[in-house]
Amino acid sequence: MGKKIRVVVLFGGRSGEHEVSLNSAASVMAALDKEKYDLIPVAITRDGRWVSGVTPEQMAAGADPLELSGTGGGVETVTLPADPTNRALTVLEKGRAGKTAAEVDVVFPVLHGTFGEDGTVQGLLELANVPYVGAGVLGSALGMDKVLMKTVLAQHGVPQARFWPCLRRDWEGDPAAVIAGVERILGYPCFVKPANLGSSVGVSKAHDREGLVRALNVAARYDRKIIVEEFVSAREVEVSVLGNDDPIASVPGEIIPLKEFYDYEAKYVDGLSELKVPADLPPDVVGRLQDLAVKVFKVLDCSGMARVDFFIRRADGEVLVNEINTIPGFTRFSMYPKLWEATGIGYRELLDRLIDLAIERHRDRARSRTDFTPPGR
Ligand SMILES: Nc1ncnc2c1ncn2[C@@H]1O[C@H](COP(=O)(O)OP(=O)(O)O)[C@@H](O)[C@H]1O
Ligand SMILES: [Mg+2]
C-alpha cells in the first residue's frame, strides 16, 4: 500500500451548530479507514481558534483546547496559512507562525452553519490550495443564504414556497411596511427565518400579526437578513446528492416531526422525530424528487455532497424545494449517510468517495490557467 493520505478533520467552529458538528465529526473520525488515512483532528473553538490533536469527544466533554495546547501529543494552536506553495498546518507560538505542524493532503470540514458551511472556510482552503470535501465558495455561500438560494432557484424554475425577503434594517426602520408586505403576499400562518442559519435556530411559525412581530424580532437577533415564507402543510422528505459535475441522487427519506414543526429540539432530542428511510412514495414522485435534487445541486454550483430538502404539499401532492444543506448532519444516524446506506453506499465507502471527489475537484480546478499573456507581448 502507498503513502497514507493525510486528512485534516475540522470541527466545532464559530457557529450556533458547534455541538452538532462535534457529533458529526466523532462519527466521521471513527469511521475513516485508518489504513488509508492519517487523521489529524483540528478543533475550532467557539471564538474561532484552531487547535490540532484535540478530538471531538474531548471537546464534547468540555475540554478547553487552548489549555491543552502545547502539552504534547500534537496538541498545538495552529493555523493554515493562505500560502499555496506550503499547504501545511503551521504552529502558532505566542500568536506568531512557528514551525510546520503537518503537511495536508485533504481537509474534511465537518462544520455546520456560519464560518464553516457558508464559504468562509472554503475560501481559506482555496487560497491555501488544499483539496477539501464538499461545495466550494460559491455553492457553500448560496446554499447558506436562503434568500439568494431561493432567488437563484426561482430563476431556474424550481418550485418553492412563496417568500418575502427583508433586511433587519427594514424591520427596525419601518415595521408597518414589513408587516403589510407579508400580509399582502403571504398571509398567516407563515414561517420566519434568519437567512443564514441552520438547525432551525431562530425559525418560528407565526399564526397572526402578534406572532409575526415576535418571530421577526427573534430572527433579527441572528441575522441582518430575514426571510418570511408562506406556510406549506406538507410531508417533509430529503434526498442526498453525491458527486461533482455528474452527481447522483439517493432514495428519499421522510422526516416525521412529533412537534408542530421540525425545530431544533425535534432535530436533536431523541424521540421527538422519526426518520423513515426510504420514504413511502410512489416511483414517479421518487423520480421527480431525485431529478429536482440533482438540478438544485447543479444550479447552486455544489460539489461533493449536499442534502436537498423538500415539501410534498398535502393539498395537491406538489413537490416544493425547501432548502439545500452543503454540509449535512453526518453522524451514523443522520439522514445524509442513512439515505446512502439505503441506496447501497455504506458509511465508510461514502467517506472514501467524498475524499476522492475532493481530490478530483482540486485536480480539475488546477487545470484552469491562472496566468495570461496578452497577444503581442
Ligand atoms: N414554509 C414552510 N412551511 C412549513 N414548514 C416550514 C416552512 N419552512 C420551514 N418549515 C419547518 O421548519 C423547519 C426548519 O426550516 P428550514 O428552512 O429547513 O431551516 P433550517 O435551515 O434551520 O433547517 C423545516 O424542517 C420545517 O419543519
Ligand atoms: Mg432544514
Image (cartoon, rainbow, N blue to C red):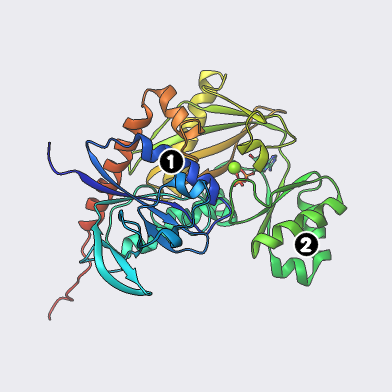
* Mark 1 lies within 8 Å of ligand 1 (Cβ measured): no
Residue 16 located left or right of residue 192? left
Q: Nearer the viewer, residue 377 or 130?
A: 130
**Mark 1 Cα shell of 10 Å, populated few (<14), some (14-19), many (≥20):** many
- Locate residue 160, reporting x and y percent: 61, 42
Quarter of the image with the N terminus is top left
- Locate residue 364, reporting x and y percent: 24, 51
Q: Nearer the viewer, residue 159 or 89?
A: 89
Which type of secondary structure does the marked residue at label 2 adopt?
A: helix
Q: From the viewer's perspective, is the residue at label 1 or at label 2 nearer?
A: 1
For ligand 1, the image quadrant comes to top right
Q: Which residue is mark 2?
A: 178
* Amino acid under disc 2: Val
In three-dimensional space, the C-alpha distance between marks 1 and 2, rounded to whole angstroms, equals: 43 Å
Residue 19 located left or right of residue 201? left
What residue is drawn where x is 49% and y is 41%? 23
Residue 198 tag number: none
What residue is drawn where x is 32% and y is 61%? 126
- Locate residue 234, reporting x and y percent: 68, 32
Residue 373 located left or right of residue 145? left
What is the quadrant of residue 99 in the picture?
bottom left
Which type of secondary structure does the marked residue at label 1 adopt?
A: helix
Q: Which residue is mark 1?
A: 26
Quarter of the image with the C terminus is bottom left
- Locate residue 172, reporting x and y percent: 76, 69
The first of marks 1 and 2 along the sequence is 1
Q: Is residue 149 above or below residue 269?
A: below
* Amino acid under disc 1: Ala
Q: Is residue 318 above or below residue 76?
A: above
